[in-house]
Amino acid sequence: MMGERIDSLDILRGIAVLMMIFLQIFDFFARVDIYSDAPYYMPFFNMPIHAIGFGLFIFVSGACVYLSVSKRLKRNIKKPRIFLHILKRYGGYILISLFFTTFALEFQVFFLWNEVIQGIGVTALAAALIILFFRSKWIFAGLGLLVIAIRPFLGQLLENDFIYQNFPYNQLTFSPVADGISVLLNATVRGYFSLSFIIPITLFGAVAAVLILRHRKRQLARTSLLTGIAFVLFSLLLHIAYIPIDRYNLSPSTTVFFIGTSFLLFGLTESLLQRFKKGMISNMLITFGKAAIVAYLFHFVLIFKPLVVLGLESTFDTSVSYLFTIILVIIIYYTCKIWLLKRHLLFSRIASLKKTRPI
């Protein structure tokens, strides 16, 4: 299993990216706002419904980092080389996020650390360092819970006039030092996809990867389902009792909720894969999962940006918006299929060009 792709992880990543691109493309076209209008927005949890997809995407990334590190450790590759590999891959996520947010959205999104790819990039690097030195699922879980517990206090430490005036959250000062510190604070604590908010989800994704490698399929599904139920119930108790689930205020119970829903979906996916053969739907989700970054970038750069330029954003009624969304999701799906079929040819051509380049 170590050297093979895990179908359940590809399916989960496919579910996550499909949730994100479908609802966001719909939002690009429709006059309704999925971030504030029901049924796309859940006022009880103060979050859009596709936020569950973001949490799932982060969870799967944590599992993939663990599997990647474990595979290389098993081949006796030195730890610095393993981290260099992770740095090239996930450091690239940060650069991709910088360029595409600046082009498709605005640099302010990157500055605020409000884009999921940049958050995954930094968090994956931090998780890789932890995984390189610790191999226990209990350490991953303990560290994740510790960060969830202390994160509100970190936020309170930054809520003072000195920080607001010198290192503002949402305003460039055009001082390299001040803006650099502001980005650092946004990346670690203040942003929607800050390190302190999403690394617990990433570390519990690593816990899931440990279960994948050590448990049989039936036990894996059962353990994941029970873990998911426990976390979801705990988050709901926190929500009712004292700490509401709130995506926009990054409450601790929100992180617990995302961990729980991710484990639930993971366990459910494993159970279904054991009972049924892969079919058209699972193969479609696997395609989206394998080419998740392509699908994600496509829907922003080649759909959202042209709509903004043409002045067609938020101009259609619900039924027309759904029709356009379905058509474009199908186009993205076939684009992903072509990418998966042709990428090796593209990479080999790039490699051959490098070899024939004159010195």
Image: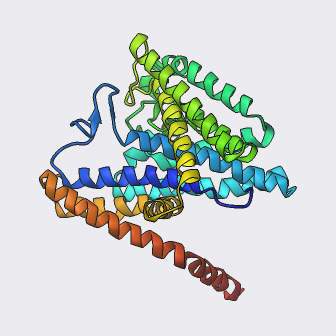
Q: Residue at x 39, y 30 (%)?
A: 247
Kindly indicate the quadrant of the structure image that contains residue 74: bottom right
Where residue 325 appears, as percent x and y from the top left, is 26, 60
Residue 73 to residue 233: above or below: below
Q: Residue at x 46, y 46 (%)?
A: 116
Residue 83 visible to the viewer: no
Q: Residue furthest front?
A: 275
Q: Residue at x 66, y 47 (%)?
A: 217
Where residue 326 appears, as percent x and y from the top left, is 27, 62
Q: Nearer the viewer, residue 219 or 286?
A: 219
Residue 292 falls left or right of residue 27: right
Residue 95 falls left or right of residue 133: left
Residue 174 falls left or right of residue 331: right
Residue 57 visible to the viewer: yes
Q: Nearer the viewer, residue 59 or 80?
A: 59
Q: Residue at x 56, y 35 (%)?
A: 225
Q: Residue furthest right?
A: 76
